[in-house]
């Protein structure tokens, strides 16, 4: 007998841009380069923490990971613009925290996937030298729910 379980998806939103729409320049390398405000709804029962990753699968050399943060408290329902929460890891620029959209000029529209994971654990227990991909892999393994918001950016 096969048992199938389904979990409700988290609703992830930003007051800076709508799903599938352009991310304002202020949140990119062409602007202030700080993270946009994000908010989410009530997570499922059993949520003990959150993790967030942002990546750009359209990058010329393969997926570029812009931000990874974990151990966000279960009581959180959002992150203010530019706010640092939880434990941030090095992004693919080898710097901790957020780095905004910065595709090569003339490379066309890039899609930025903001992925929020509701986790059934208090702490992910990653090593101090963890990268964004490590956060995503560990969070995927512990996720009880997930939400995604996609923004675009084009440097002309």
Image (cartoon, rainbow, N blue to C red):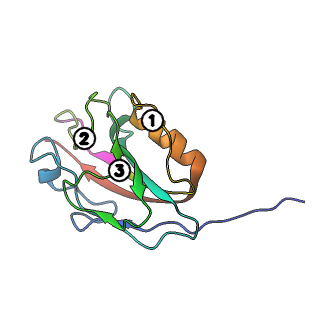
Q: Nearer the viewer, mark 2 or mark 1?
A: 1
Q: Nearer the viewer, mark 3 or mark 1?
A: 3
Q: Secondary structure at mark 2?
A: loop
Instruction: Give coordinates of residue 133: x percent, y percent.
Output: 45, 35
Q: Is residue 112 magenta?
A: yes
Please give left or right for residue 145 compared with residue 12 in the image: right
Identify the mark nearer the N-term, 2 or 1: 2
Q: Quadrant of residue 120?
A: bottom right
Please give left or right for residue 84 compared with residue 133 in the image: left
**Start-end of magenta stretch:** 106-113
Instruction: Give coordinates of residue 18: x percent, y percent.
Output: 29, 66
Q: Secondary structure at mark 3?
A: loop
**Toward the viewer: 32 or 63?**
32
Residue beneath disc 1: 133
Q: Which mark is residue 86?
A: 3
Q: Residue at x 58, y 66 (%)?
A: 46
């Amino acid at each position: 007998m096969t048992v199938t379980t389904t979990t409700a998806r988290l609703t992830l939103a930003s007051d800076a841009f709508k799903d599938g729409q352009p991310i304002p320049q202020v949140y990119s390398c062409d602007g202030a380069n700080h993270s946009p405000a994000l908010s989410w709804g009530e997570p499922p029962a059993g949520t003990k923490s959150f993790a967030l990753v942002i990546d750009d699968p359209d990058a010329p050399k393969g997926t570029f990971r812009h931000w990874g943060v974990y151990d966000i408290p279960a009581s959180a329902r959002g992150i203010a613009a530019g706010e640092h929460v939880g434990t941030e890891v090095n992004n693919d620029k080898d710097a901790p925290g957020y780095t905004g959209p910065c595709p090569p000029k003339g490379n066309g529209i890039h899609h930025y996937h903001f992925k929020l994971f509701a986790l059934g654990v208090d702490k992910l227990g990653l090593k101090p030298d963890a990268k964004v991909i490590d956060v995503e892999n560990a969070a995927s393994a512990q996720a009880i729910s997930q939400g995604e918001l996609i923004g675009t950016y084009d440097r002309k």
